[in-house]
Image: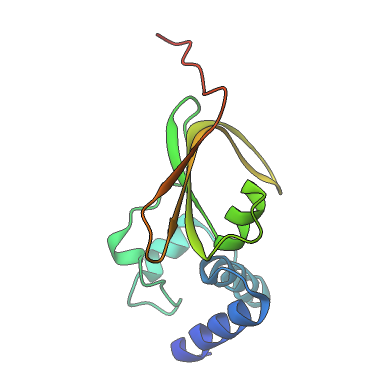
Amino acid sequence: MKKEEFWQAVKEEAKRNDADEVLVYLRRLVECARTAGKPITRAVLDAHGPNGTVPSPPWRSRTRVRLTMEKNRKYTVWLTDQGGRAFMGKPDEPESRWRVYGEYVGNEPGVGLWLHVEYVEQTTAMGEPRLFAVSPPVRDDRR
């Protein structure tokens, strides 16, 4: 499959399913590797890089991916628009970017990661960011 065909298929599937392109890209990448009988490892991804045979996402050259998260450290997690509206219980909100900020407490395989959420930020296309504080906020017992 050529690079252009791969990305076209990703875009079409994302649009057809109202899905996030990044998540579709990752799933399709795993499926292609599984079909070829080649496991995806960090070494494999690094060896292919931006000019290799595996289509590289447009952000790869400017983003450093952290493969592990440390407990008791604070992170920002971006949600898809659909995921953000579902998470906040606001299905009728305008299309937005959603950012969740909180302390990492662990993950559950097949489910996702767990954060003690401090706040959620919603930004619409033409609007100012809106912050939604979580009450009670995360206590920092380490001080």
Image spot of residue 111 (x, y percent): 70, 47
**Residue drawn 43% across and 47% down?**
130
Q: How is the image coloured?
A: rainbow
Q: Quadrant of residue 136?
A: top right
In the drawing, does residue 70 fall left or right of residue 38? Answer: left
Query: Image quadrant for the C terminus?
Result: top left
Q: Foreground: 88 or 59?
A: 88
Please say if 113 is above or below 48: above
**Residue drawn 56% across and 67% down?**
26
Image spot of residue 74 (x, y percent): 43, 32
Q: Foreground: 60 or 98?
A: 98
Please say if 29 is above or below 100: below
**Which residue is farthest left?**
62
Q: Foreground: 123 or 77?
A: 123
**Residue drawn 46% across and 63% down?**
44
Q: Foreground: 41 or 112?
A: 112
Image spot of residue 12 (x, y percent): 58, 85
**Which residue is farthest right?**
110
Q: How many marks?
A: 0
In the drawing, does residue 130 fall left or right of residue 95? Answer: left
Image spot of residue 122 (x, y percent): 47, 51
In the drawing, does residue 119 fall left or right of residue 18? Answer: left
**Residue drawn 36% across and 72% down?**
58
